[in-house]
Image: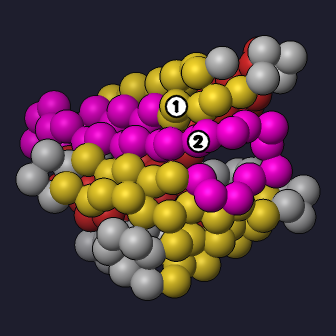
Amino acid sequence: MIETVNVTKIIALPSDKAWQAIAQIGGLERWFPVITACQVTGCDVGATRLMTLTSGEEIIDRIESIDHQTRRFQYNRIKSPFPVNRYLGTVGVCKIGPDSSEISWSVEIDVDKNHRDELVGFIKQALSDGIDGLERNLSSSTTDLQI
């Protein structure tokens, strides 16, 4: 069963700053409470990131696209402890004002109907926490960008 989970939030950060952090591929351990480590291998499209969850389980994402013009980032989860057959994430950044951005993070999953509700709820909460964490991390940064 194909399911799309989307979380969109307006954050108090300039869109350039938010996009620059997202396009760097790494740093997710500073945004997501459920991630304790994030190691990136490579750069740009084709790079991978290995993330360790608080449970000790691992996730591997492969970067599929980074479009700086449209500020759209897409990744494919190629290893996951979750019961999914497909996991494609897309992150977009839109300028709302000089010091505010809209972050839209969506995930398309192929999930068994028996795990659907639990997994959709988990992903929705994780994405929401991640966007909040991105805002906190970049707002508290003493340099122009903490990566």
Q: Is residue 51 above or below residue 113?
A: below
Q: Describe the element under mark 2 as helix, strand or loop.
A: strand
Q: Residue at x 33, y 52 (%)?
A: 73
Q: Quadrant of residue 66?
A: bottom left
Q: Amino acid at mark 1?
A: Glu
Asked if the magenta segment contains residue 114, the reply would be no
- In the image, 60: left or right of 73? right
- Mark 1 Cα within 10 Å, few/some/many (few <14, many 20+)? some
Q: Is residue 108 above or below residue 76?
A: above
Q: Residue at x 50, y 42 (%)?
A: 88
Marks 1 and 2, the one that precedes in the sequence = 2
Q: How is the image coloured?
A: secondary structure
Residue position for label 1: 108
Judge whether residue 128 can be spotted in this image: no
Q: Position of residue 12 (x, y in %)?
A: 31, 40
Q: Are marks 1 and 2 in contact (CB under 8 Å)?
A: yes
Q: Amino acid at mark 2?
A: Tyr
Judge whether residue 43 can be spotted in this image: yes
Q: Is residue 60 above or below residue 118?
A: below
Q: Quadrant of the N terminus?
A: top right
Q: Is residue 147 above or below residue 107?
A: below
- In the image, 114: left or right of 145? right
Q: Describe the element under mark 1 as helix, strand or loop.
A: strand
Q: Seen from this angle, which residue lies furthest bottom?
A: 42
Segment colored magenta = 77-106
Q: Position of residue 47 (x, y in %)?
A: 44, 75
Asked if the magenta segment contains residue 83, the reply would be yes
Report, in whole angstroms, how far the alpha carbon at label 1 lies from the one at label 2: 6 Å
Residue position for label 2: 87
Q: Residue at x 40, y 72 (%)?
A: 46
Residue 97 versus residue 87: which sits nearer the camera? 87
